[in-house]
Amino acid sequence: MLTINELTNLSLIHMDLKSVTKDGVLFELANYLANEKRVSDTKLFLNDVYEREEIVSTGIGMKIAIPHAKSKHVLIPSVIFGKSENGIEFDSLDNKPAHLFFMIAMPEDSANQHLKVLALLSRKLMHESFRESLMQAKSKEEVLALLYTME
């Protein structure tokens, strides 16, 4: 299984998302992946993310959203993190804004890797202390250190 430190790095941590809508944050995160040459086409990758969102919102509640997709447009398996201090309406299960975003991008042929990463993230994010640490983190390095404790 891929580990968090294989899937993310400092260039994939964004402490101050500019977007104020669900569509905006999905585009912003996907665009960051494209800028890092981790997806080949932002729009086509986003089509796969939206296809997944149609099943049920990936706004899981507790200030968290984990949009994800397996896509032929993913070049490098990745987890990108973004934070919004003000929160963004994300059709979350608890009807509250999301502040912490983890976008999982996996190649189409990656079997069930995205499910394993999703489970790993979900287990850690169930702990209020971990979520609060992410909310209080002031630097990319702090967030990355917290993510690396997930292994």
Image: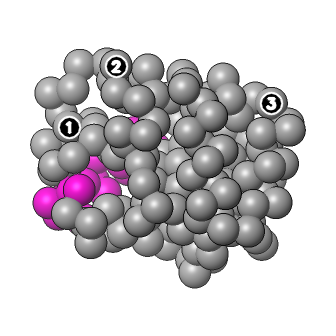
The answer to whether one can see residue 85 in this image is yes
Q: Quadrant of residue 124?
A: top right
Q: Give left or right: position of 46 versus 40.
A: right
Task: Identify the element where label 2 is drawn.
Answer: loop
Per the rendered image, the range of residues in magenta is: 38-55
The 10 Å Cα crowd at callout 3, few under 14, some 14 to 19, many 20 or more, is: few
The 10 Å Cα crowd at callout 1, few under 14, some 14 to 19, many 20 or more, is: many
| Image coordinates for residue 130, horizontal then vertical, percent | 78, 39
Asked whether 108 or 6 is in front, the reply is 6
| Image coordinates for residue 86, horizontal then vertical, percent | 77, 72
Name the residue that disc number 3 marks.
127
Name the residue that disc number 2 marks.
1
Name the residue that disc number 1 marks.
107
Sequence-earlier tag: 3 or 2: 2
Sequence-earlier tag: 1 or 2: 2
Q: Give left or right: position of 11 versus 72.
A: right
Task: Identify the element where label 3 is drawn.
Answer: loop
For residue 49: magenta? yes
